[in-house]
Each structure stands twice: as C-alpha cells, then as structure tokens.
Image: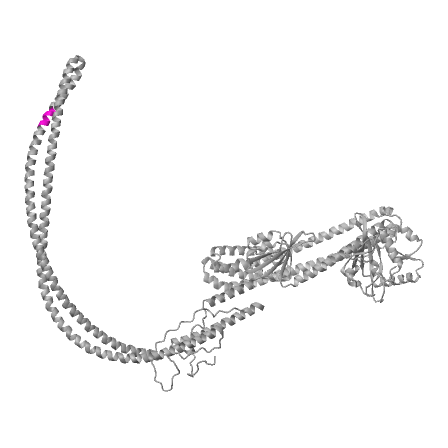
Amino acid sequence: MRNNQPVTQKEVMLPVGQAIVSTTDLKGRITAVNPVFVQISGFTEQELIGQPHNLVRHPDMPPEAFADLWTTLQQGRPWTGLVKNRCKNGDHYWVLANATPIYENGQPVGYMSVRTAPSREQVAAAEGAYRDFREGRAAGLKISEGQVVKAGFSLGGWFKSRSIAQRIFAICGLLTAGMLLVGLLGLFSVGSSDARLQTVYDDRVVPLKQLKEVADAYAVSIVDLSHKTRDGAETFESALGKVEQAQALIADRWKAYSATYLTDDEKALAAQAAGLMQQGDKVTGQLKDILRNKDKDALTAFAAKDLYPAIDPISDKLTELISLQLQVAQRSVEQAHEDATAFRIKFGALLAVFAALAAMFSFGLVRSIRQPINEAVEFFKRLAEGRSDAQLNFSRRDELLAIADIARSMQIKTGCDLAEARQVAAEGARIRMALDGAGTAMTISNENNVLIYMNDAARRLWTEMTPAMRQRVPSFSVDTMMQHSLVDFFDDEDVKAAYRQQLTAPRTLEVAMCGHILQVTATPVRDAQGNYLGRASQWLDRTLEVAVENEVAGIVGGAARGDFTRRVATEGKSGFFLHLAEDLNTLMQTSQVGLDEVAGVLSAVADGDLTQRVHGDYQGTFGQLKDDVHRTVGRLQDIVGQITDATDAINTAAKEIASGNQDLSARTEEQASSLEETASSMEQLTSTVKHNADNARTANELAGSAQTVAEQGGEVVAQVVSTMTAIHQSSSRIADIIGVIDGIAFQTNILALNAAVEAARAGEQGRGFAVVATEVRNLAQRSAAAAREIKGLISDSVGKVETGDRLVAQAGRTMDEVVSSIKRVAKIMADISNASREQSAGIEQVSLAVSQMDEVTQQNAALVEEAAAAAESLEEQAQALATAVSVFKVQAAAHGAPARLAAPRRALPKASAKGDAGGSWSAGQLIRADDPEDTWEEF
C-alpha cells in the first residue's frame, strides 16, 4: 500500500456546501477533477490528471477501508464512507466519500467520486474506528460498504434480508388510503391557492390596471393633449373629442375600481382621490369650453395656471393608491407563503401520524420495513432538495438494496452534475455580477430574439427612454420588457429587419430612438456544439457625444461667420467633453477679446482718435494683427499730418486765384454787352430776308402744284385715248363676229332647205323631219336678219368711235403742250426759291455766328464767375479740410494747444440681438493714451 509522506497532522476544513468531484478509469487513474479538489489538495490539475487516485491517500487510512471500497465498486455497487486524504504539503482533510461505477452502453468505463464535508461527530467516530484497525484492536469488527459493522452471523441481519413481497400486499390498502388522503389534501391546497390567487387578481391586479388607465387618461388624454393642441399638433375638434372620451373612460374605470374590495386605508385614499377628481372634472369642463372656443392663448394660460395644479394632485393620489395595491398584494403573497409553510408542517405531521397508524396496524412486519422505507424517503427528499450529504446505508439484503444502490449511484451522479452545475453557475454568477456592475448597457436575447437579461446600465438607459417610448407605446415599462422582443421597440424598419435575422457574426447598428442616438453592437451566442442560442447586445449611448459634436459644429460655424460670442455649455459634461468645452470656450474668449480690442481701435480711428492702441498680450496671428494695427494707425497719423500741411498751401493758392478771376470777370462782361447790340441788328436783317425767301418758296410750291395737276390731266387724257383705242378695236372684233354669225345663218338656211328637199323625197316617213327642217330654216332666217341689223348698228358705232378717237388724240397733244409750259414756269420759280433760300441761309449763318459769339462771350463771363466762385469754394473747402483733419488726434493734446472743431461722428452699429457684446464700442469705452511715448515698444 502506498505510503505518502510527510504528514503534519494539521487538518484543513472542507467548506460546507462544497463538493470534491473526480473521475478515474478502471485502473484508478485520475481523468478529471474539479477546482475544489485542486484547491484543497494543493496539487495542480496537471499534477493530478493521469496519476493514481491514491496520490492523496493518507497513511492513517486502514487498508481494510480501501479493500472494501474496491470490492464494492467491482461488484457494480456504490460505496459511501469517511476518508482521510493527504494534501500536497502534508496536511489532511476529512471527506464523506461517495463512489460509484460509470456505465456506458451497460458496461463500466470508470469510477466517479463525490466527496463532501462530514460532521465533526462522524470524523471523531471514524478517527477512533480507523485507529483501532491500524492498531489491531478491531476484533469482531469489519468495514462493509464503508461502514464499521460487527462481523459474523446476526439474527437481525438475517431477518432484514428477507423478501418483502408479502409485506407489500399487507400494507397496500393502508398506503392506498394514505394516498387518497394526501391527494385530497393536495386538492384542497390547490383550491385554496387558486381562490387566493383569484382574490389577488380581482381585488389587486385588475384595480391596478384600472388606476393606471385613469392616471394615463389624465396625463396623456388631458394634460399632454392640451400641449399638443397648443403646439398645433392636434386640432381643437379632435382634442375636444379625445377629452370627452377620456372623461368617459375615467368615469367607467373609477366606477369599476370602486366596486372592488377596498381596505380601510384604500377607502380613505379613494375618497380623497374622488374629491380631487371632482375638482379635476370642473377644470376639465373649463378646458372643453376653451377647446370649443378654439382659443390658443387662453389654452396656454389655462394649462399653466389651472390645469396642472388640478391634475397633478390627482396623479399623486392615484400613485398612492397604486402603491397601496402593490403593498396589499405583497401582504397577500406573504400570507400565502405562511399558509403554505403551515400546510407543509401539517402535512408532515399527518405523514407522521399516518406512519404511526401504519406501524400499529402492521404489527412487527411493518416495523421491520418502515425504517428502510423512511430512510429511502428521506434520502430522496434530501436528494430532491439538492443536498449531496444525504446518506442511505442499508445493512439488509432484500429487494430494497438494489433500489438503494441505484439511488446512491444516482445521488453520486447527481452530486457530480450538481457540482458541475454549481461551478457553471458560479462562473455564470461571476459573469452576471460583472455584467450587472459594468458601465456599458448590455442585454441578452434568446434564439427567438426574446429579451432574457439586461444589466443595471441597460435598465438605467431604458428607464431614461421610458417617457419618450410611452409616446409610441403607452403601456411600455422596463419591468415588462422581459419576454418581449427588442424588435417591438425599434422605430426604424431597416433596423427591425436587421435585428430579426439570425446573427452569423458580430454586427454594429446606429439606431435613433426616443431622442437618443444608440450604437448597438450585437454578438451571436453559441453553445459548445455551435448551436445558435441568441445574441448579446451592447448599447452605447452616443446622444451626448452627438450633441457635443453638433454643439461644436455650431460654435465653429458661428466663428466662421464672425460670431465669437457663442460658448459651449459645460453643465452636464465631464471628462474629455468637459476639457473640450473648456478649451473651445477659452479659444472663443481669446478670439472675441482680441477682435474686440482691434474693433475698439478701429472705432476710435473712425471717431478721429489716432492715439488708441491694442493693450492685450497676444501671440501668433493675434500678435501679428496687433502689430499691423499699430503700424496702420501710425501711417494714418503721418498721412493726416501731410494733409494738414497741404491744406494750408491750397488755401493760400485759392485766395490768389479768386482775386485774378474777379478782374477777368469784369472785362468779360463789357465785351458781352457790345456783342449783344451787334446780334440785335443782325436778327432784324435776317428776319426781312427770311420773309422774302418764304414768299418765293410759297410761289414755287404753287407752281409745283400746277405742274402736278397738269401732269395728272395729261395722264387722264392719255388714258382716255387708250380707252377709245381699245373700244375701237373691240367694235371691230364684234363686227367680225357678227359677220361670222351671218355666214352661219346662211349655211343653216341652205342646210335646212336641203333637209326639206330630202324630207319631201322621203314621203310620209320624212314628214316630221320636214317640219323640223322648216323650223330650223325659219330660225336661220331670223338670225340672219338680226345679224344684219346688229352689223349696221356696229358699223355706225365704229364710225363714231373713230371720230372720238381722233378728237381725244388732238386733246392729248394739247395737254402735252400745257404740261410742258407749266414745267418751264415751275423750273423758273424753283430757281428763284433756291436763290432766296441760299440768301436767307447766308444771313442766318452770319446772325448765328454773331449769336454764338455773344453766347460764347456770355459763357466766358459765366465761366469766369464760376472760376471765381470755384476759387472761393476751393478756399472754403481747404478751410473745411483743415477743420476735418483737425478732428484726428495724432498725439496727446499739448497744454495750451488751440481747440479744434469736432468732426461729425459716424453712428456705430448697434449690438446684435444675439449678444454681440464685444462687437461695437462707444466713445466712452475707448482707452485714451496719456503718454505720447506710449507706443507698446516693450512688445
């Protein structure tokens, strides 16, 4: 037997509730250990795995104990006993060892051991018994199945090993009666629980819902609705209808609530709430009147002054009623727990009484099997409670032994599983505690996206979003989120679709909801076999970050537009955002102060004060700007001085020019007077000549008119001649046509005569044709006679037309002679008119020249006067320029210096409504330099 040394005889206590678990192969080599084994033994897991289990055997353990252990295990039965094990450093620890074979497919493949902490009495008894075995003083004793028992034959042991089949028939009736009684008691207990639960539901849960609906109606359908109506989100007609619906709902739910069972405290609170609700109804009536009148201003004033003070106390009182409902429900639950405990006590007592009756009626047989059955019952009860220290030690060999062995094996397997589960649970608890305490919001959903866990940070986040979420889901509550899918709370359909899909890899979504910007990172959760179990979601609230980004963008945008008065609010910020806000505010303050100083200097320059300077200590661009401003003002001082000197010189020259212009003006006026007299005489001569030219022009126009009339008469006579010629030609053609018609009539008469002759030859058949021929001949004769008459008339007309044609031709020749004579007269009159016109034009040019000379002389006189006036004005402007330049203060006023007139002051721009406090300066804000040497040379 292995003797592990050294030993210190120092005991290490195994904590109560912890179990040492290990497995071995059929050779006893360790294949697995739990952390408790590693911790208490002092060996590492690598040192234990693969080693014989007797590595931890203590030398004080007798060989008989391990011989009994192996004998029992090789029989396929579990073994339970006290074992003293050795630690790596020589210390020892006592355990209550439970070992059993491990079966796979009905074949043993190894052994499993679950060891728990024994009681001190068990340790003391085992210490003494094992000492007796080590020292050889255990005569008549043996170790069997881990227990120290007497060796040899025993009548009691023999009796206990008998079959119990016949005993079962004897007690079946009694057990059946007991089962019925237990069933009836169970039914009574279930009925009582159902009644109590129904009472809690009817008198607490339903009223809680009714009170919540009343509170929501006041808060949402009355108060919040007035906000929406005031802001224009709800029409007055719709708001009035919803308020009336809310009143009806409140009355109905309050009536239903009042009909439930009310405690004394609840009645008092309900009475107080009813009084407040009556006042609220009055205020609601006033609200309805305002909604009917559609008076938005009255609605705004009424909501702040009357509506809130009337509704808020109702909400507070309803909250107290809701709290009272929860308290009463809690007391009911506690009473139910107390009743259940009492029932269990009564049930146990009933079992004890029943067992006593069974023992009394079963005589000795029942007494012989009662103890093992009770031990088995207690064992299973403890096992069901998860207690790994339950023991079932049978010294008999009847049918109960197989059950006991299976039960003990199951106990060991359950203990192993329980230890493993506790280890997993401990790890899970550590993870849960870490998640609960994490600063990042975390949620876990199952494979159906149903929420099953949220840490404290997530609960705080969703609690913060609750008011906004209730705008969309009025019944929303963080406490009711469990067992619901998070998809139900998203607004964005794309996010919903993405969240419904089973995750194959981590995914990050940007979600905007309830006034928050959330970055959701979802990670799939899988078991050891890779099966999808759900997802773990990390919720990062970027609302403040985005708000700071927008705020910084607004500050930068304002600075880009020249507004340096904006600041980043530091309230509610910490860490990086606080430092960023402070640095930006410092930057804006520096820019504002620097630019304000520059604006002050420029404003002083605008007011004529060139002595002002920038006083702040600046670096970089602002330092360069300060130097540039100083150089600019210095240059202005030099320029203003030069202008002052030039103004004095201009003033002197202007005076001399004005004196010379006055003399020239007098001489020019005399010359202008002489030219005016000459011009008057030329105007009279021009008038006479112009009159003669007008008469000649009139005669020329009359001759031209006569020539035109004569030409028109000649043209008319020519047209008459042309017409008469055409008539003569037409008459000749008509005579020709009449001749043709006469010839046709003659030929028709001959043909008609021939036709009559042929008709006569034809006899009776040609009689009708002869009549027609006769009529044709008569018609031809009449046509010939008419043609002869027309021909005579046409011949007479042609003769007369020829006579008219000769007369018209003679008149045309006479008109041509008249027109020719008139043309010669018109030409002579035109020559006379042209000569008169040229004479008038020459005189007009002479008169015009004299007039122009007179005008030029007068203009010269005027220009001389204007030059004189300009010289005087130049002198005045020079004086005014000197006065204007005197406004500029180029250095500190010397004592006794002559006073200068103040230049007109330009109005300064007013500060904007946005608070451009540093954007403009008044004259009182300008800093006057007292020392002319103060030019900031130290910078």
Q: Residue furthest bottom?
A: 896
The image position of residue 326, as x and y in percent, is 64, 60
Specify the quadrant of the image occupied by residue 750: top left
Is residue 341 visible from the viewing direction of this image? yes
Model colouring: one colour
The image position of residue 278, as x and y in percent, is 54, 60
Number of numbered discs overlaid on the protein picture: 0
Q: Is residue 32 above or below residue 752?
A: below
- In the depicted view, which residue is nearer to us: 409 or 353? 409
Q: Is residue 37 above or below residue 778?
A: below
Lateral position of residue 293 relative to residue 505, left or right: left
What residue is at 48 percent from the left and 64 percent from the top? Answer: 301
The quarter of the image holding the N terminus is bottom right
Residue 783 shown in magenta: yes
Q: Main secondary structure of the magenta part?
A: helix
- In the depicted view, which residue is nearer to us: 145 or 264? 145
The image position of residue 655, as x and y in percent, is 25, 80
Residue 653 shown in magenta: no
The part of the chain drawn in magenta is 782-788
- In the depicted view, which residue is nearer to us: 776 or 661? 661
Lateral position of residue 445 relative to residue 123, left or right: left
The image position of residue 246, as x and y in percent, is 53, 56
Is residue 254 visible from the viewing direction of this image? no
Lateral position of residue 388 relative to residue 156, left or right: left
